[in-house]
Amino acid sequence: MSAALSEPQPFRQSPSRRPIAAIADELGYSPDWNWSWNSYKAMVVRLSEEYGLTRHLEIGGGRDTLFTPEEAERLGLSVTINDISAGELALAPAAFAKICCDVAAPDTMQRVAPGSYDLVYSRMVMEHVRDARRLWQNQYAMLAPGGVALAFVPTLYAPAFALNRLVPEAVSSAIVSRLFPDRHQEGDNPKFPAFYDHCFGDPAKVVPMLEGCGYRETLVLPFYGYSYFWKIPVLRQVDAAFTRLTRERDWRRFTSFAYIMAVK
């Protein structure tokens, strides 16, 4: 099924709308990286329930969609799956609407009607985009007034991601394949080139760009820690100590992941 360019219905928000931060607090927000992975789906569900966001676009969903068709139906959601790869998109459930395009391309809005979605979200996708500003601009155009964009991203300058950004792709791919054998190119979790454009846990590096795109409410939730060095003796201990220090002092320059959220 293809996403139709139908006339969108404007999303109307409640005059008593709570800020996004209140939802994160309600979910028990913790800066520990495990919370970010364990609570991502719950965050999407609560945003949907709180603000009445029923028309979803999952960017980069491909083979690993956030919801099953049964879950989406139970929650009353109309979900469209996007991916830049037709092959990846073919692996998504047939029950979902699908749109194959580069959401960060200048001509994206020729494929999608403005205001078509209430909630646009992605996980571990934004770091692969060369021009994140263009992507956020396109997301803004896709959203109805009051709609929300959420990007779950790995962030600079966490040591593992800074290393991934600096070394040649062939070298980083070899390292990842050695440490995580399941992440080969033919597997279920392949590695793609990463650029980390505007992937930061420091609001000062992200919010001005979002405001420049027109968003009126923004929130950057930081998270600290990851498992990339767990298989390497000594380095594992050093990185764990560094993570504890950065989390205790909330050094946003060294976050590992972030939820970047913005309201149109």
Image: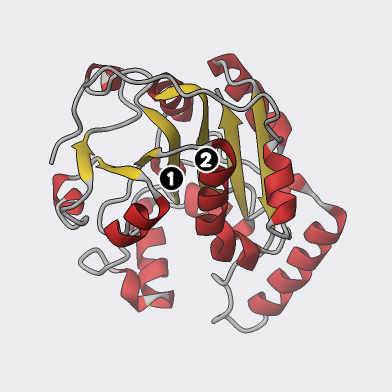
Asked which secondary structure carries label 2, the reply is strand
> Which quadrant of the structure image shows residue 39?
bottom right
- Identify the residue shown where x is 23% and y is 33%: 101
Tell me, yes or no, if residue 19 can be seen here: yes
**Mark 2 or 1, nearer chain start:** 1
Left or right: 52 with respect to 23? left
- From the top left corner, tell me how far across and down residue 164 is, in percent: 49, 54
Which is more toward the observer, 50 or 40? Answer: 50
Q: Is residue 205 above or below residue 221?
A: above
The picture places residue 182, in percent across and down from the top left corner, at 33, 75
Residue at mark 2? 150
Secondary element at tag 1: strand
Q: Relative to 5, is 242 on the left or the right?
A: right
From what the image shows, is residue 187 above or below residue 237?
above
User: What residue did someone put label 1 on?
Assistant: 122
Could you give the CA–CA distance between mark 2 and mark 1, rounded to whole angstroms? 7 Å
Q: Residue at x 27, y 32 (%)?
A: 102
Q: Dot 2, how many residues are within 10 Å of its Cα: few (below 14), some (14-19), or many (20+)? A: many
Which three-letter amino acid code belongs to the residue tagged 2?
A: Leu
Q: Is residue 54 above or below residue 33?
A: above
